[in-house]
Amino acid sequence: MFLSIKNIPKVYWSSDKSFNFKPKFSTSFFLILGLIIFGFGEGLLILSTSGNSPWSVLAEGISKNSELSIGAATFLVSVSVLFLWIFLKQKPGLGTIFNIIIISGMIDVTLFFFEAPSSVILKYLLAIFAVILVGIGSGIYLVANLGPGPRDGLMTGLTKITNLPIALVRACLEISVVIAGWYLGGTVGAGTLIFAFGIGPCVAFGLFIVNKIFS
């Protein structure tokens, strides 16, 4: 069962080293593909207006209090989080840089070209579909093994320093971000809960699918 996956699988296009700045074409292709799918899913979740993912709640809150688009705010948040890596002794990889650029760009592209559904049922179906896309995109980009995204690196860095369980550290981060984003005016709703409870299984499913297809 995919829910029992504990390690990120390695396939023929996975990079041997996380800090590889000259990856194979296939590795770069799947990294970019995964991040495009990830960003598209994030954009669709925002478009559903049923509640954003925790970090998108923060980005939307910042956007509402500035002249930045949600994508630009996402970029700003990602870069700010990356600066925290300095104190956590984390090193960014090529995947980290692409993560910041592609996901923020895809959010703005999605919001520009697509419209929110009018039906409440369609909004929740779109939210579920969006979380599945984020999970599959995460699975593809993580298997590329070219460095974690800013938030994932923050999570692992804090885990090493505090020696607390990953689940607890991630939960504390997500809750803190949601509270800050909600205070700034970001959208919190059922979609936020769908993301919170569904993203773990969806990432595991993404890893399982990639391993099944390419191993």
Image: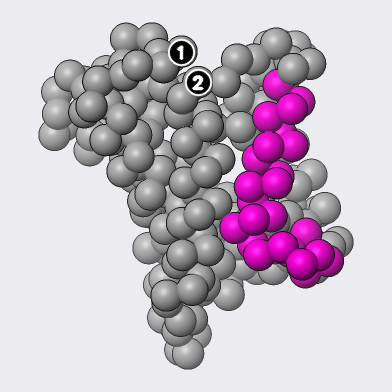
* Residue 15 image point, x, y percent: 31, 16
Residue 127 position within the rendered picture, expressed as x and y whole percent measured from the top left: 46, 66
What residue sits right under mark 2 in the picture? 93
* Disc 1 to disc 2: CB gap under 8 Å: yes
Disc number for residue 63: none
Taking depth in this image into account, of 12 and 200 the one nearest to the observer is 12
For numbered disc 1, what is the local secondary structure? loop
Question: Separation of disc 1 and disc 2 at Cα?
Answer: 5 Å
Residue lying at 64% horizontally and 56% vertically, measured from the top left: 72
Q: Quadrant of the N terminus?
A: top left
> Which residue lies at the image location 81% right of the left edge and 53% below the top edge?
179
Under tag 2, what secondary structure? Answer: loop
Q: Position of residue 20 (x, y in %)?
A: 40, 13
The magenta-colored residue range is 60-85
213 w.r.t. 61: above or below: above
Say the numbered circle drawn on residue 19. Answer: 1
Q: What type is the residue that disc 1 sits on? A: Phe
